[in-house]
Image (cartoon, rainbow, N blue to C red):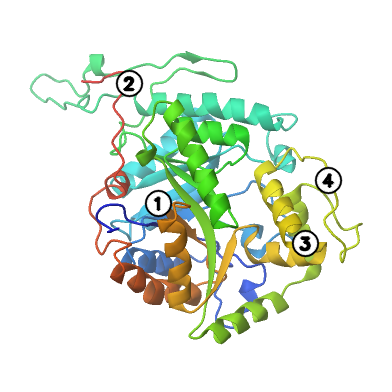
Amino acid sequence: MNATDRPMRLGLFLQGAGHHVAGWRHPEAEFGGENLGLIQRIAATAEAGHFDMLFLADGLTTSADAHPSFVARLEPVALLSALAMGTRHIGLAATMSTTYTEPFHLARAFASLDHLSGGRAAWNAVTTSYARSSANFMRGAHPSHDDRYAIAEEFIDVVRGLWDSFADDAFVKDKARGVYVEPGRVHTLNHQGRFFTVGGPLNVSRPPQGHPVIIQSGSSGPGQRLAARVGEIIFTAQQTEAEGRAFREGLHAQVREAGRDPDHVMVLPGVCPVIGGTEAEAKALYAQLQGGIDPAAAILLLNDRLGHDISGYDLDGPLPDLPQSDQLQSRARLLTDLARRENLTLRELYYLVAGARGHRIVWGTPEQVADALEEWFRGGAADGFNIMPPFFPTQFERFVGDVVPILRRRGLVRGEYTGATLRENLGLPRPPNRFFPG
């Protein structure tokens, strides 16, 4: 396998205080949630390593006892717009909710980011799992899981229609005729659906990529169906190679059923690499991070992932049978399967979740980390990885400086960017305009 045939895709999942709940306590950690200078340095490092994209998650609530990376963070599209000014190649991906945003506003924000960045924008479309988010919006009760996905289906269709408001050649700017925009090359959407009524057209010209790249990160049944229909990059959490391969193969089967090409849908599991000069050094670093965990904070994080409060159960006993939660269904199922398979106690489970919130943790030397990624990639369990450093910036710098060159020597990742836009770098086609196909 050669990077020119099918390169391993790499995304940086940037969380300001690191992904490990205690990562911020490490002596080398800096705090980047609202530190633009540090975030710009991290983005420059990712671009120097030829990462495909930098990804910002987001949430719509906070509390003093939340994960340190979640307590306070800048609005992601605004932050990526700032980063667009100091980068040239790396994709810029942000999360925005289909439940607590309006299609017109979102379409305009991401079209603007695509123009500002020269065609490097990507939207992670999420339905917002947490019911407490509803308290911050005039929307009434938080919709059920299935209703949120029904809303998302219509929302995304409206957004894509708005991105197609103008033909690519609509802005003729003909001074002699006095015509700035050809009237016949503008489409008014006039969408009237179950959840949305949107007139249009969008007041931003068609994005350079046609449509910003669409990311989907739901792994439940409705989430996978939505990903199969519209997703181009799929973020997921998987713990074993076999589970990752089954997820990817199952998703690709649904992609084919939806009439799409599986080569245009890339699955990127999250991986938290803990890197040391030797295996013993990496193990000691991981132990140091685990030793810094506040048990109360770890329990709260596990409660969030499971959708249930487990503090009243015996922490040295097994995970009890819990009813299905309406939030984060796929993550709760993943953690339940992990606890049953590994015979973990609740205490062991919450310490594990505190490390990467259910994503895979790999610790070792740069060679060992590269081996782990290569095994999953060659085994068909992933098209690449969303890298989740336990803290910033040094652990990410070690990944770029030590692991990426190994992957490059093995022919797994590219040495240079190959296109001008994110779609071109990912090998994704530019979507045709549904209203102006010619």
User: In the rendered image of this protein, does residue 217 appear above or below residue 98?
Assistant: below
Residue that label 4 marks: 322
Residue that label 2 marks: 434
Number of marks present in the image shown: 4
Q: Alpha carbon of mark 1 to alpha carbon of mark 3: how far?
A: 40 Å
Residue 78 picture location, percent across and down: 46, 50
For the residue marked with disc 2, what is the amino acid?
Answer: Arg
For the residue marked with disc 3, what is the amino acid?
Answer: Asn
Residue that label 3 marks: 343
Mark 4 residue crowding within 10 angstroms, few (<14) / some (14–19) / many (20+): few
Mark 2 or 4, closer to the camera: 4
Residue plotted at (59% across, 16% down): 194
Location of residue 205 by image quarter: top left
Q: Alpha carbon of mark 4 to alpha carbon of mark 3: how far?
A: 16 Å
Residue plotted at (41% across, 51% down): 383
Mark 3 residue crowding within 10 angstroms, few (<14) / some (14–19) / many (20+): some
